[in-house]
Image (spheres, coloured by chain):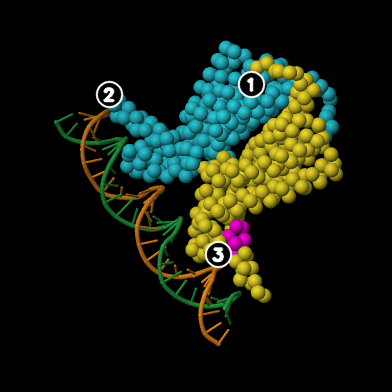
Chain colours: A yellow, B cyan, C green, D orange
Amino acid sequence: MSQSRAQQKEKTRRVIIDAAFHLLSQSRSYSSLSLREVAREAGIAPNSFYRHFEDMEELGLTLVDEGGVVLRQLMRKARQRIRDRGSVIRTSVETFMEFIRNSPHVFYLLLRERSGTSLAFRKAVSRELQYFIVELADYIQHTQNYPAADAKIQADAMVALVFNAGIEALDCRPAELKTLTATTVTQLRYIARGADEFSKTRTGTVST
Amino acid sequence: MSQSRAQQKEKTRRVIIDAAFHLLSQSRSYSSLSLREVAREAGIAPNSFYRHFEDMEELGLTLVDEGGVVLRQLMRKARQRIRDRGSVIRTSVETFMEFIRNSPHVFYLLLRERSGTSLAFRKAVSRELQYFIVELADYIQHTQNYPAADAKIQADAMVALVFNAGIEALDCRPAELKTLTATTVTQLRYIARGADEFSKTRTGTVST
DNA sequence: TTTTTGAGTGTACAAGTGTACGCTAAATAA
DNA sequence: TTATTTAGCGTACACTTGTACACTCAAAAA
């Protein structure tokens, strides 16, 4: 039992992280959380917080990283499903909607900090989203045989639309969610189809 | 001078509103503003605030309304420009980018409160954006001769993408802004083209 | 004229905040 | 064994917050 000290510390760290995630909700953004509040929720003294994090910003960035892990797990799951039953677009959108329902706290965090007041946060979230975009762009590039740049633009648009749908999903009753999903699927199809047509029609220059 | 009393009140109200807008910035969201801070910026006593607004939420909703006015002015301007020199998509995107540069405070507000913690705010911003979407859908419907529902879906996607570009524009150096604009224009073209193709190919049912 | 109204002020208070400082006690090192 | 390290705590302090209350004094009403 030569590392029980470090183990205990790691455990407390987890408690703090979980407490912070738990406090996030539709009516509570990360920036509105106070250090004392997180400490209270974690069941530790306010000062103990500093044994684990420099300040709230450092904790926040840790949360974003953890959120990124959840996102990548989601991505893997989606890939698996696509292999199982085809239909890239519908499967992706449905998997994402499921994610929002299952891990709303993570989604709140990423969504809000993406356009939040802290540059460090914005960068961190942006970096996590890039994984998604790059991966999707790769997929498009290889299955559709597009130039990498075009695939990236397309993937970027698709992720933006899915995220946008996520925002609307927050205030949706379950019934409306189906419509929203269908709408989003249609929008992604427009993009896929449009990009496809452009790649066929590729003329030298395009007029304004 | 029989209404100088009401005039003075209106004037102070404006000072408060302007003070609040002035405090908004890339590093300052509305929800992080305190009543005292706004009062300080406006040069009035904290208590005087209550002579004009019930609480900070009421002031915030007023700001969103005023932001909506700015947006609609923008829309009118864009329509004029389109009439002058064609090219709907490029003109719209450029006008919007200009708006972000000229009225960043308004954009910060709408952007953040759209996915913020207050339902009232989310609804208010959503309502303002609907003007945009409906107007754009109308345009598409009439110039392209689409069913209203399809046009709405298309317009919705376009506004989402332009807004998304706006988020990225916030952390852009002017040089990158040109690339971003070009990318966004391409994305909107994908949608326009994709929707067009779908409307042509309209078969009975579409498989998953 | 006198009376009433109401925008704006100053004081005050309870509640919450971040964090500095010094301590305890248990795990680890010597 | 003894000495050192360190996670966690309690107290304390200076600060900000929202807002209740009692006032002023000029404009509007009577």
Chain part drawn in magenta: A12-18
C30 shown above or below B7:
below
Q: Position of residue A18 (x, y in %)?
A: 61, 58
Name the residue: 53% across, 25% down.
Answer: B98
State the separation of the CA atoms marked 1 and 2. Answer: 51 Å
Q: Which residue is mark 3?
A: A43
Q: Position of residue A189 (x, y in %)?
A: 76, 30
Magenta highlight on residue B158: no
Q: Decide if residue B159 is on the left or right side of residue A204.
A: left
Quadrant location of the C terminus of chain A? top right
Q: Identity of the amino acid at label 3?
A: Gly
Tag 1's secondary structure?
helix
Q: Which residue is mark 1?
A: B89
Q: Identity of the amino acid at label 2?
A: Ser
For the residues beneath circles 2 and 3, the answer to whether they share a chain is no
Going by the picture, which residue comes out furthest to the top? B84
Q: Which numbered circle lies on residue B2?
A: 2
B196 shown above or below A75:
above
Query: Camera-side residue: A50 or C5?
Result: A50
Quadrant location of the N terminus of chain A? bottom right
Name the residue: 66% across, 48% down.
Answer: A68
Chain that bears disc 2: B
Q: Position of residue B25 (x, y in %)?
A: 47, 37
